[in-house]
Amino acid sequence: MIDPQIHIPYHKIAEHLSFIRQEKLNLELYIESNALDSISREDISRLKNQLDYNPSLTIHAPFMDLSPGAVDSKVRAVTMERFYHVLNIAEDLKVKAVVFHSGYEKWKYALNIDLWLEKSLLTWKPLVKKAEDIGAKIAIENIFEDEPENLRLLMEKMGNDSFGICFDSGHFNLFSKVSLEGWLEHLSPYIIELHLHDNNKTSDQHLPIGEGIFDFGKLFSALKGKDLIYTLEAHNAEDAKKSMRQLNKLIGS
């Protein structure tokens, strides 16, 4: 039986705390920038006490306006400041992994992957050292990538077991021009986490597993035997339950 993480924004935990505790859910906490501005050590300590059933935890870092591959050094510095703050929270919560966005958009970088890669390495090398020190992994999520080349190059250049890929099924389904087999051929050795949600290729609908057209059976078959973090990105409790049922039907006990 797979016991996945459930993605939830930090500011919604109080609203759903009774359900979370009742179901003893593992969580991926999305800590957006507004939360970073107000969150305190006392808040984190209180959260740890509320989650007294010892759940498995991951964090999704903020991403709006941030750019880990920024050419502008001051933008990159602000991005790193935010990311270090997240890693400090990750240390307090003893999380398994922190998910970050790659920041790569091919048109913004005029198809110059090398420029993005050069600047990205300046960001991720010191951050992965911090992650290793606290016993966590960094997982880079595919977002607007229509093929896996930039992520493969980043993984190869980093060459660190604490730095891997969070493969997002919904984003792949919506944006990719390359087959799932092509993505897995390049990235399978680096995948450490899955973000699982579905869509009909019309928008980022975040449907429960099986309610869109993504081939989850093919994904799970290709990754069978790998030690992965499974994260359900549902937008309400009922969809989370549906995805949990479908996940265990597809993967089995």
Image (cartoon, rainbow, N blue to C red):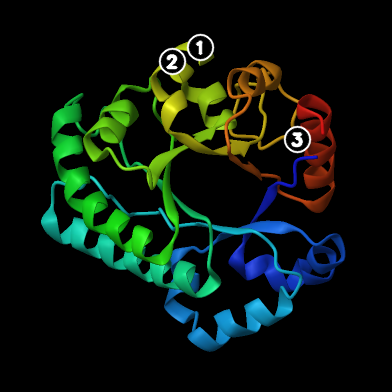
What amino acid is labelled 1 in the image?
Glu
User: Can you give x and y, in whole percent of width and height, for residue 231 in the image?
Assistant: 64, 44
Instruction: Please state the horizontal and vertical placement of residue 211, each as a whole percent of the image.
Output: 77, 26
Count the marks: how many?
3
Work out how far the residue at label 3 is from the one at label 2, CA to CA, in angstroms.
26 Å
Q: Tag 3: residue type?
A: Pro
Query: Which callout, 3 or 1, points to the residue nearer the camera?
Result: 1
Q: Which residue is mark 3?
A: 208
Label 3, secondary structure: give it. loop
In percent of width and height, residue 189 lies at 43, 27
Vertical placement of residue 229 versus 56, above or below? above
Give 188 or 33, whichever is nearer the viewer: 188
Q: Quadrant of the C terminus?
A: top right
Q: Circle 1 — which element? A: helix
Q: CA distance from mark 1 to mark 2?
A: 6 Å
| Residue under pointer 2 | 185
Residue 70 locus on image (x, y percent)? 20, 48
The residue carrying pointer 3 sits among few (fewer than 14), some (14 to 19) or many (20 or more) residues within 10 Å by Cα, namely many
Disc on res. 181: 1
